């Protein structure tokens, strides 16, 4: 796994060797950031990487100009790899690494983010609740995006709190984008 572009382009990232962590493939990461490039300016952005695994999504955002990334992960081995990756890139000052449950973090956080990545395990019981918590608790800034990588059997619909879509499918995995409703979406 490598950083695709930007300040850390080509740098290799380490991750756990077992199947407990599903790091985003280069193809998925490239598609995500291509789609984001038309939606949000990452320069100076604050990033939240939930279920961070190796930290590859947050690190990719830092490489592309984000000013800060918060990584939230419960798995001790994965946390160790995030710390090692951040140290190897020399970006410790632009990161915060937290060992805690993602939903616990969301329900307690007073921080606001421009971009939130969530890549929960497929069996995670609260995946469907993530958008409601993020938007209800105002974790996401008004112009921001939430991206959830999830199993293809889970489908999201828009609500008065958020707009769900677009989505991109990669085999058994789907990445769904969420944002605050725009004026024309709320008036129709």
Image (tube, rainbow, N blue to C red):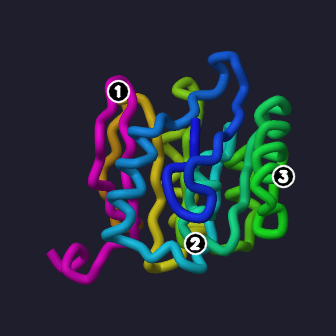
Give the Cα distance between marks 1 and 3: 37 Å
Q: Mark 3 and mark 1 in contact (Cβ < 8 Å)?
A: no
Badge 1 or badge 3: first in the primary sequence: 3
Badge 2 or badge 3: first in the primary sequence: 2
Q: Picture coordinates of residue 70 (x, y %)?
A: 72, 60
Q: Looking at the rendered structure, which numbered label has been put on residue 4? A: none
Q: Looking at the rendered structure, which numbered label has been put on residue 87? A: 3
Asked if residue 18 is positioned above or below residue 50 in the image, the reply reads: above
Q: Is residue 126 something that shows in the picture?
A: no
The secondary element bearing badge 3 is classed as helix
Q: Picture coordinates of residue 42 (x, y %)?
A: 51, 73
Taking depth in this image into account, of 89 and 158 the one nearest to the observer is: 89
Residue linked to disc 1: 153
Badge 1 or badge 2: first in the primary sequence: 2
Asked where in the image residue 138 lies, by quadrant, the reply is: bottom right
The residue located at (57%, 42%) in the rendering is: 2
**In this image, 130 relative to 102: left or right?**
left
Q: Is residue 183 magenta?
A: yes
Estimate how packed mark 2 is, as few (under 14), some (14 to 19) or many (20 or more) residues with alpha carbons within 10 Å. Answer: some
Q: Residue furthest front?
A: 10
Q: Looking at the rendered structure, which numbered label has been put on residue 65? A: 2
């Amino acid at each position: 796994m490598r950083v695709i572009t930007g300040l850390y382009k080509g740098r290799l990232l380490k991750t756990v060797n077992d199947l407990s962590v599903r790091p985003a493939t280069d193809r998925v990461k490239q598609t995500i950031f291509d789609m984001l490039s038309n939606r949000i300016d990452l320069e100076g952005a604050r990033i939240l990487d939930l279920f961070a695994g190796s930290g590859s999504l947050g690190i990719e955002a830092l490489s592309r100009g984000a000013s800060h990334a918060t990584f939230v992960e419960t798995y001790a081995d994965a946390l160790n790899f995030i710390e090692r990756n951040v140290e190897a890139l020399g970006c410790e000052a632009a990161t915060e690494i937290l060992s805690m449950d993602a939903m616990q973090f969301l329900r307690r956080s007073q921080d606001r983010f421009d971009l939130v990545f969530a890549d929960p395990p497929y069996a995670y019981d609260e995946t469907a609740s993530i958008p409601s918590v993020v938007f209800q608790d105002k974790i996401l800034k008004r112009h921001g995006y939430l991206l959830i990588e999830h199993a293809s059997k889970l489908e999201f619909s828009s609500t008065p709190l958020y707009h769900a879509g677009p989505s991109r499918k990669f085999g058994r995995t789907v990445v769904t984008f969420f944002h605050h409703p725009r004026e024309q979406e709320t008036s129709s």
